[in-house]
């Protein structure tokens, strides 16, 4: 099989027809900077709208660990919704409710990637679904 060119993203898109968890989810990496500087930063050029939503549900950059814990508990325990192969590895999408500090669940899609040559998933992004 030919390698996927570095400029190409997503040649394969697969709807999961069976139950599947993200491999090695118990070892998943969630970078604090991704949460604080992007998802919980209303000033971020691309993440500002996501931050506004998450903040309205009670999350904050000062207590970013709440979001990390909720993603681990509420998303990594769920079945994968979609798998995509990219030039950099395998991406997994999860659609599930996220428990929030205000007690109202938020339907969120999270994206995780296992980079080529590794077996540990890392958090890429999340957005409302």
Image (tube, grey):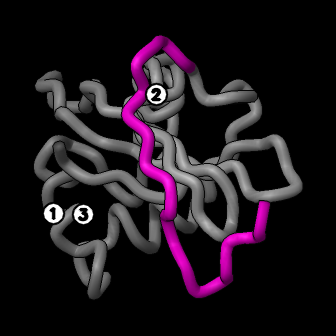
Q: Earlier along the polypeptide chain: callout 2 or callout 1?
A: 1
Residue 10 covered by magenta stretch: yes
Which residue is at a point 74% across and 28% down the rendered structure image?
24
Identify the image quadrant of residue 7.
bottom right
Residue 96 lies, with reference to residue 47, above or below; the image says above
Q: From the viewer's perspective, tell me whether residue 76 is left or right of residue 98.
A: right
Q: CA distance from mark 2 to mark 3?
A: 24 Å
Residue name at image x 67 percent, y 83 percent: 6
Task: Determine whether the residue tagged by mark 1 lies in a helix, strand or loop.
Answer: helix
Residue at the disc numbered 3? 51
- Observer-nearest residue: 45 or 15? 15
Give the label on residue 109, or none.
none
Q: Taking the image as drawn, is residue 55 in sight?
A: yes
Foreground: 125 or 4? 4
- From the viewer's perspective, is 26 left or right of 104? right
Relative to 38, 106 lies left or right = left
Whether residue 123 is visible, yes or no, is no
Vertical placement of residue 87 versus 111, above or below: below
Identify the residue position indicated by label 1 in the image: 52
Q: Position of residue 70 (x, y in %)?
A: 42, 30
Mark 2 residue crowding within 10 angstroms, few (<14) / some (14–19) / many (20+): many
**The quadrant where residue 105 appears:** top left
Q: Are marks 3 and 1 in contact (CB under 8 Å)?
A: yes
* Residue 1, image quadrant: bottom right
Q: Is residue 38 above or below residue 5?
A: above
Mark 2–mark 1 Cα distance, whole angstroms, equals 26 Å
Which residue is at the front of the view, 129 or 103?
129
**Left or right position of 24 against 97:** right
Determine the residue positioned at 17% across, 43% down.
Answer: 129
């Amino acid at each position: 099989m030919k390698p996927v060119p570095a400029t190409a993203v997503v040649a394969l898109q697969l709807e999961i027809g069976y139950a599947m968890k993200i491999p090695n989810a118990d070892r998943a990496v969630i970078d604090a900077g991704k949460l604080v500087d992007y998802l919980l930063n209303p000033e971020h050029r691309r993440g500002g709208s996501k931050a506004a939503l998450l903040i309205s549900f009670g999350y904050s950059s000062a207590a970013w660990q709440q979001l990390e814990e909720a993603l681990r508990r509420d998303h990594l325990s769920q079945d994968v919704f979609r798998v995509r192969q990219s030039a950099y590895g395998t991406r997994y999408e999860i659609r599930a409710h996220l428990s929030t500090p205000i007690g109202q669940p938020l339907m969120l899609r999270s994206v995780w990637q296992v980079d080529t040559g590794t077996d540990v998933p890392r958090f890429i992004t999340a957005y409302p679904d």
